[in-house]
């Protein structure tokens, strides 16, 4: 029998994400009374809520009235974390288009695949990355003129020159599109509707009101400070940090990437109470001698997801910081969070099934399937006849309703929260790529067999983003990943 969420039911409003977010914030947070409070802070800019809302509207107007953006067009967001990221994503949606987020560290060939997959017509990036974007468009054989490639910095074709105060016809359509690793090689697109993301924001807000630790923090301050270090191009960073943080009235202290010394200095400066992180970062905070020089006790709670979190590391971080560490789970297709808290409260309906699709009893391991607000027609390949999404993850539920994720049907490797598909890396004849858990990294690492010669490795590393690079291996033979994983653990 499917396991229903323990949380009380709620209505998902029939509205677009930008309208929901700005209306919710004005009605339910400190920004409603004081829009001049800071909401987004990075190394180069601080935006108040009023400035953020104005920037969003003016970017949308500039796209429509100046750039020739049409309803249904896709804009590729190829950016590191920045204070301008939320306004760009929401502005594209206001203009009637789809925002497609990509890793800014991708090589031109990797980026070309994403551009073709999403039929990108416009791009926003940083000045130093424009040559890579142009090369990617050439690889993809896509005729996107330079006038449709914008930057957030420099003095060229910047988004700041595009901003327009003119009115425009808002034609919000469907989607945000994020590109994730496919199970058999190159990335695939995950199309999320506005309603998907609005529903997940509300699911998490309802959960927060029923969690003793989080509700106490929320009651104490209506203008909390959150650390925002995970990439916004990833569904975890985009929904759980960027969108949920703004919806809850938080001030986001934004980092382009994790550096332990800089992270700790910002914590001491801004005194954040909340951070959404991944196990490799928690490991650094617990064990790195640099982190031990700083006072990290402003944190009240941290959320960990995107990779397995051991009980030992969870306890060590809690002892080190005094914060409660929540262990969470989700997939991009669930927008993304489906399970949260110390007792693994499911935000959606869940069932565990065997290889034939038959439901399993409590304690039996099988594929984790989830059901929530969705569009079954648009995602028929992943959703079964009962409306459940098949995640490809193996797990079970105990008699107390706690969920355990124990394996994957998919052959994906999770390296520091990033997905790596072995098939994409196995271009060398008779090569096999497997994922082996590394305690020192608190993450799986991609390992190759046979051992890759230095010259091949150097060639290979130029073709893929850094987290897909191989970390060594031993020679075997046929591609039998499960057997090799077992052997590697012995």
Image (cartoon, helix red, strand yellow):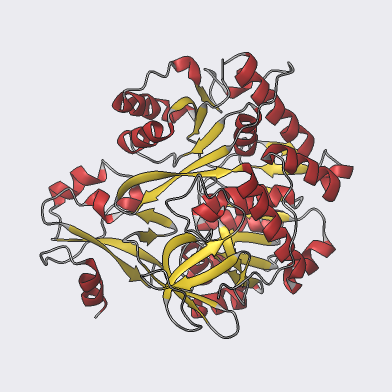
**Pick the front one: 177 or 275:** 177
Residue at image point 76% right, 38% down:
48
Q: Is residue 258 visible?
A: no
Left or right, 135 with respect to 371, comes to left
Residue at image point 64% right, 14% down:
65
Residue at image point 75% right, 53% down:
248
Q: In x, y percent, where is residue 358?
A: 43, 73
Q: How many marks?
A: 0
Q: In x, y percent, where is residue 360?
A: 46, 78
Question: Which quarter of the rendered picture does the C terminus lie within?
Answer: bottom left
Indicate the quadrant where residue 295 lies.
Answer: bottom right
Q: Is residue 248 visible?
A: yes
Question: Which quarter of the rendered picture does the N terminus lie within?
Answer: bottom right
Residue at image point 35% right, 32% down:
112
Q: In x, y percent, where is residue 396?
A: 47, 77
**Pick the front one: 37 or 480:** 480
Outermost front residue: 385
Can you say whether 58 is above or below 477 in the image?
Answer: above
Indicate the quadrant where residue 487 lies.
Answer: bottom left
**Pick the front one: 238 or 316:** 238
Indicate the quadrant where residue 482 lies.
Answer: bottom left
Outermost right residue: 33
Left or right, 183 with respect to 124, comes to left
């Amino acid at each position: 029998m499917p396991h229903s969420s323990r949380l009380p039911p709620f209505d998902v409003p029939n509205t677009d994400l930008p309208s929901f977010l700005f209306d919710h914030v004005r009605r339910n947070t400190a920004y409603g009374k004081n829009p001049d409070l800071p909401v987004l802070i990075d190394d180069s800019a601080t935006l108040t809520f009023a400035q953020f809302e104005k920037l969003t509207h003016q970017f949308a107007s500039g796209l429509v009235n100046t750039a020739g953006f049409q309803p249904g067009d896709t804009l590729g967001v190829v950016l590191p974390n920045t204070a301008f990221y939320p306004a760009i994503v929401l502005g594209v949606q206001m203009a009637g288009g789809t925002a497609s987020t990509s890793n800014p560290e991708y090589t031109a060939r990797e980026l070309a695949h994403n551009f073709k997959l999403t039929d990108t017509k416009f791009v926003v990036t940083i000045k130093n990355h424009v040559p890579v974007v142009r090369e990617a468009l050439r690889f993809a054989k896509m005729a996107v003129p330079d006038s449709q490639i914008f930057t957030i910095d420099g003095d060229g074709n910047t988004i700041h020159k595009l901003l327009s105060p003119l009115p425009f016809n808002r034609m919000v359509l469907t989607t945000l599109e994020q590109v994730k690793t496919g199970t058999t090689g190159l990335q695939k697109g995950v199309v999320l509707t506005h309603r998907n993301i609005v529903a997940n924001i509300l699911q998490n807000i309802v959960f927060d009101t029923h969690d003793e630790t989080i509700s106490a923090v929320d009651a104490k301050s209506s203008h909390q400070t959150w650390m925002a270090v995970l990439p916004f191009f990833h569904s975890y960073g985009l929904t759980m940090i960027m969108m949920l943080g703004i919806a809850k009235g938080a001030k986001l202290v934004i980092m382009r990437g994790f550096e332990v010394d800089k992270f700790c200095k910002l914590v001491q400066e801004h005194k954040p109470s909340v951070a959404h992180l991944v196990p490799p970062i928690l490991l650094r905070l617990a064990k790195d001698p640099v982190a031990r020089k700083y006072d990290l006790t402003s944190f009240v709670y941290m959320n960990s997801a995107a990779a397995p979190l051991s009980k030992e590391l969870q306890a060590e971080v809690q002892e080190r910081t005094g914060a409660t560490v929540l262990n969470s789970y989700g997939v991009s297709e669930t927008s993304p969070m489906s399970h949260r808290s110390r007792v693994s409260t499911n935000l959606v309906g869940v069932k565990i099934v065997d290889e034939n699709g038959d439901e399993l009893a409590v304690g039996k391991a099988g594929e984790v399937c989830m059901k929530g607000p969705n569009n079954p027609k648009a995602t028929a390949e992943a959703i079964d006849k009962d409306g459940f999404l098949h995640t490809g993850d193996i797990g079970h539920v105990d008699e107390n309703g706690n969920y355990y994720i124990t394996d994957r049907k998919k052959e994906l490797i999770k390296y520091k929260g990033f997905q790596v598909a072995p098939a994409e890396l196995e271009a060398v004849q008779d090569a096999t790529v497997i994922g082996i858990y590394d305690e020192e990294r608190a993450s799986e690492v991609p390992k190759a067999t046979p051992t890759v010669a230095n010259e091949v490795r150097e060639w290979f590393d130029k073709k893929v983003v850094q987290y897909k690079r191989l970390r060594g291996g031993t020679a075997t033979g046929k591609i039998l990943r499960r057997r090799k994983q077992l052997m590697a653990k012995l």
